[in-house]
Amino acid sequence: MTTTLITVAPTGAESRKSDVPALPVTLAELVTTARECAAVGASVIHVHLRDDKAEPTLDLGRLKEAVAALRAETGLIVQLSSGGAVTDPEEDRLRVLDAEPDMASCTMGTVNFGDDVFLNRWGFIVDLHTRMQERAIVPEYEIFDLGQLAALQRLLDRHGLPYGGHVHLDLVMGVPGGMPGTVPALAACLQAMRDLPEGATFSATGIGRSTLPVLLTSLAAGGHLRVGMEDTITYAKGQPVESNAQLVARAAGFARLAQRPPMPVADARELLGIRHG
Ligand code: KMH
Ligand code: ZN
């Protein structure tokens, strides 16, 4: 039986703690969330940190502390965000790799991001990709729009496969400014992914109300899942998300119904080519 890799993105850089009280913003809250999500089927955690005022931060000391705590308290694969917040400078985003996570995100192009711009120059993408190769960090390529799949193909052609040799990407759908979270958009991505190296895998996440359509479409298409309060803060109409574990449990339930239960962490490490020890 095939299984479903579930990534949880518990915090993000966009929601305010004052607006979303259930958002995990302290290290203790992050570790508790991580444990709860692991217990109900997550195998990867995509991490954004907050400072003492619950504002987004890429402080290296905090990142190192979080990687160590998540490794000590959970078996989850730790993926740090190199995207940060739209205001973060490139050098801070590159420095994230110094925290030596198992994985880091690598966004494949610039995209309008609500009223802001999420800037990802080609030269910056190449730097991230090659530094991850050198440091044995597995990238998750974040795809916000169809053309970014062609950019990924170009990156791999020119600069080689990522560390571990396996290509894994995440379709981030429904960002205002990016591709919509719809069946036709995901189908267009599937078509474009046929040009990627044999065995490449994808997960998908739908922002806001596109969460469920994207989740169901990804499962139907043989894809994996990302869920979490970075992407969704409403569980159903008028019902705020209570916890990240609530979203992971729902995703795991759908995955079981689809006869593709959650992937054990050991299998996820093997699939993604995470370094040992
Ligand atoms: N917060 C967004 C601007 C990533 O984590 O790599 C970028 C983002 C993608 O969330
Ligand atoms: Zn993120």
Image (spheres, rainbow, N blue to C red):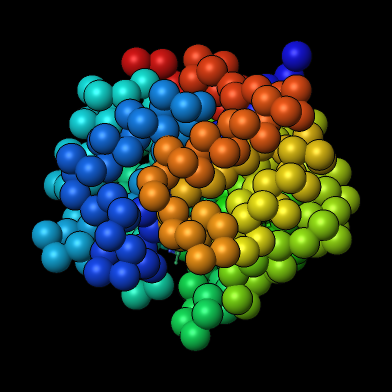
Quadrant where the N terminus is found in the figure: top right
Count how many numbered circles sit on residues in the image: 0
Q: Nearer the viewer, residue 129 or 30?
A: 30
On the rendered structure, is 18 left or right of 10?
left
Which residue does the image show at 59% across and 38% down from the upper left? 251
Q: Nearer the viewer, residue 255 or 197?
A: 255
Looking at the image, residue 199 lies above or below residue 113: above
On the rendered structure, is 252 left or right of 247?
right
Which residue does the image show at 28% across and 50% down from the upper left? 24
Quadrant where the C terminus is found in the figure: top left
Instruction: Residue 224: tell me if it is visible.
Output: yes
Give x and y (percent) for residue 19.
31, 70
Looking at the image, residue 16 lies above or below residue 108: below
Give x and y (percent) for residue 21.
28, 60
Looking at the image, residue 65 lies above or below residue 271: below
Give x and y (percent) for residue 164.
55, 26
Instruction: Residue 134: tell me if it is visible.
Output: no
Residue sitting at the far bottom: 115
Give x and y (percent) for residue 88.
33, 69
Q: Nearer the viewer, residue 165 or 185?
A: 185
